[in-house]
Amino acid sequence: MEFNYLDYGEDLIEESVSLKKPAVYVFDNFATMVEAQGYYDKNKELFSSDSLFIMKEDLWDKLFFSDKTLIKEDKLKLIFYGILSQKDKEFFKIDNYSESIDTAYEFFHFYDFLSQHKLEPAEFKLQAKWQQQRLERFAEIRKRYEAYLEENNLIDRNLKKDFKNFSTQYIDKFKHINFINILYFNNFEEELLQSLENDGKNITHILQLKESDFDKNKLRMNALSFPGSLDTEIKIYQSKERILELVNALAKIDLETDITEIIDLSDQEDSLENILSPELIKFEKLLSFKESGIYRFLEELYKNSLSFKINRDGFKLDLNQLLKSSYNKKFQLYYNLNEKDLQDLKSFSNYEYVYLDREKINYLDNDKFKRIISDLKTLKTINNIDDLIDYLKELNLEVLKEDKYQNRDLEQLYDSLMELKTISLLELDNFLKSESSKAVQLFKLMLDYIGFKKLKSRSNEESLKAVVKKMEQTPYKSRERVLMINANQGCLPKEFRIDTFLSEADLKGLDLELKEVNYLKQKYDFFSHIFNAKQSELFYIENIDNNTTSSPFIEELKLRYQIEDTESEYQSSRQKEILARLFKADGYKNYQSQFSKKLLQEDEMLIELEDFPQQKLSISHYRLENLKRCPFKFYMNDIANIESEKLEVDRQLSMLMIGSIAHDFFEHCIEEFGIPLKNCSRTKLEAILKEKLEKYDLQIHDYFKKYYHAILFDNLIDSLFSLDKSISSRIEKIVEAETELNLKKHDIFKSEEGISAYISGRPDILIEAEDGSNYIIDLKTGSGSMEQLALYSLMLNFKDRDFSTTVKAIYKIMDNELEIDRKDREEKLEIKIKEELSELFEEQRYKTIYKSDCKKHCDYYEICRVVVK
């Protein structure tokens, strides 16, 4: 085995690739391979034998041959699920195929890890009991897994890499194999290199580092030496914010004629990509198929199928999920949902519905939602992969194609479906036959499969000024200039992770220095790009408030070569100029003059006569509370009747729902049995309550039904008897007891514009006693307000003004407590109402009143922030 070492600044590709004698060139960096192949194709001698350029993992696959059918990872997960015993499923807490996917990934990754490092499970000295249990469980499953493959003449990539399958037939015509800047070989690869040498191949390692930095015996990098003197001009820039950093980086390329390569050291997706012109700045990445509109639509369809249940009454569907899906842009596009459709659907959530059924969908009388139900019904009939493929072909997915993918998105989907057909041919979908929701599991299988596919977005290369890449997308080569952003702690070096149940201590015990190797590799990539460029410009963010600091590699570079930060062109104090530069804001300031006077007045939220039909304004207790709290909220909720957006139905126990059921139950029983209760038994009350709960079937989440039963059955019945006892002990003889009585409305205020305000309300229980007194009782499962009862008393006694004969009381249902209020509140309340209305009409606008809890408790907070100046 030969080792050739190059200095920084030398051209790795030109020094490594021979244009005369054919050879195999092996890489672990795809961008470097593409660069080398391009250099070779451009400069090789005419009619010379071609060299082979290949990635390391691809070469390893080619060097092992088997006549068995090779099964790829997506199908392996299905086999893994199929061979699990009931005990396995209980151990891993797996109920269906979808829940097994992560465990399957861990299982196969673990055995790949064993093969790469030539390890046997017996070598492990695990400290934690759960680790040992997991290892033993994996070992049992592995035996069954290998037996299944053998029985069906199948093999996976891992098992294929057995040296009894080793063959150099693929590279027989080549004598020389050159490994280009590969800094680490695992134990399996060391043995493989030895086998290649034994077969007569000449192995050469070409490395761009110091000879002392590479351990020839272990075939791995063991240090990083810095050049004694710098041949690179280095500038380091600090910014306080992400957008400032990018603006400063882009400012460096403004005058460049060639496309500038920007290396982004962050692992996170860059949200700034969405605001920058793709015609000028290209983010070099293969997009996951998951980002396509087709995938996002299918994912929403899948989420709805999870809760869609066929029953004897037709079906039952989770309203919460359908609501969220209906606000998804791609779901909207496919089913052509508009604002009216969404409002119709949302109306159910305002009545606390959790589920929809056939009756509710028919009530909507909306063909679009009927189409959704039809698609879900058909999906539920899927029985195998062939059915699934036919189902997807029937969907009109053409409407979801996107130009930015050059229409490859739909083509990629259909290609993937044909690949999935292998599952049907091998009858692997039989593993799902025992599933109660087989159709849903097959759909999930399809989503997982296409989710791994990649798409390329369209770009106009002619107008490009810069290309943003991740480090692994950039080749090892000499450059005139390198520009890196996000050189921050956390981004560089990145945290070491191993996708197995082994800890770092376990790896140490196995004499595996994977963390150290990973750290050195990241350090080498960073510094080699700098030292191989004539000019390097590095950008990092320093923001103490956000705990953001520079990478330790930046600090090491500064200390070693005594480099100071260079002042950035754009600072936070010039933010206005920066935004104008980015968004071309010139002339926007004149746009306001183009708005109509009426539109500007609407923005001021002025009171208009048309806000009050028939020049009447109803003031109930809750409307009064809104007016006192904030006139803008009063307008939104009670004048304009703009409902708050409720895109998610609460899944927890709802006090509002408990209150609704309790009120319904109490009113029904009082109307049927009177007060005092007559001919009433616990058995009769239980039958009524059971009927009420069935009535609320679509408004109570299935998971919580048992809790509602537990809370309500004993509590409500006992509470009703307690209320009856409390009333009977206070009122000697009752003339009449009424529930939900509409009291007579009375005008209480008139504005100069002629708008009359009247008080309105409806008490839960009104009792007339033989002695001429009245009892107003408000039923509450939560907190109550005596002011609400005072309003009812004011309405009841508005003409005679004798409030002394009216007793006000709140009955706390869950506490079995009747709370009597004997304070005279009515006249003070009347004065307060008039003051609030006077102030409103004097102001002539619906002003906002800000309080610290607005953001948390006000449904209109976001609108208020935009509209009110």
Image (cartoon, grey):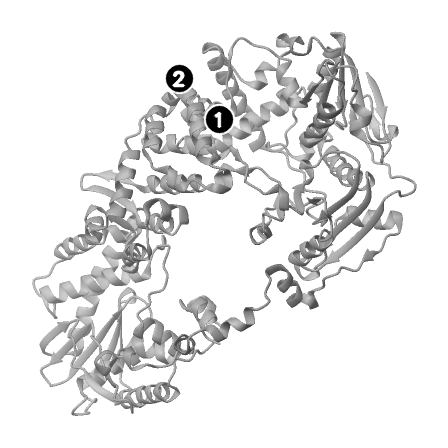
The count of marks equals 2
Q: Secondary structure at mark 1?
A: helix
x then y, percent, for residue 368:
27, 47
The quarter of the picture where the N terminus appears is top right
Residue placed under numbered mark 2 in the picture: 425
Amino acid residing under circle 2: Leu
Do residues under tags 2 and 1 come within 8 Å of each other at their CB atoms? Answer: no
Q: Nearer the viewer, residue 796 or 839?
A: 839
Q: Quadrant of residue 810?
A: bottom left
Can you give x and y, in whole percent of width and height, for residue 338 in the image? 33, 54
Say whether residue 298 is visible: yes
Residue 781's tag is none
What amino acid type is highlighted by mark number 1? Asp
> Which comes before the other along the chain, label 2 or label 1?
1
Q: Nearer the viewer, residue 505 or 541?
A: 541
Figure check: 93 above or below 330: above
Q: Which tag is nearer the camera, tag 2 or tag 1?
A: 2
| Cα separation between marks 2 and 1 | 15 Å
Residue 94 seen in the figure: no
The answer to whether residue 606 is left or right of residue 578 is left
Tell me what residue is drawn at x 12 percent, y 70 percent. 675
Measured along the vertical axis of the image, is residue 304 above or below residue 429?
A: below
Mark 2 residue element: helix
Percent position of residue 76, x then y: 49, 23
Percent across and percent down for residue 330 are 40, 46
**Left or right, 67 with reference to 728:** right
- Location of mark 1 (residue): 74
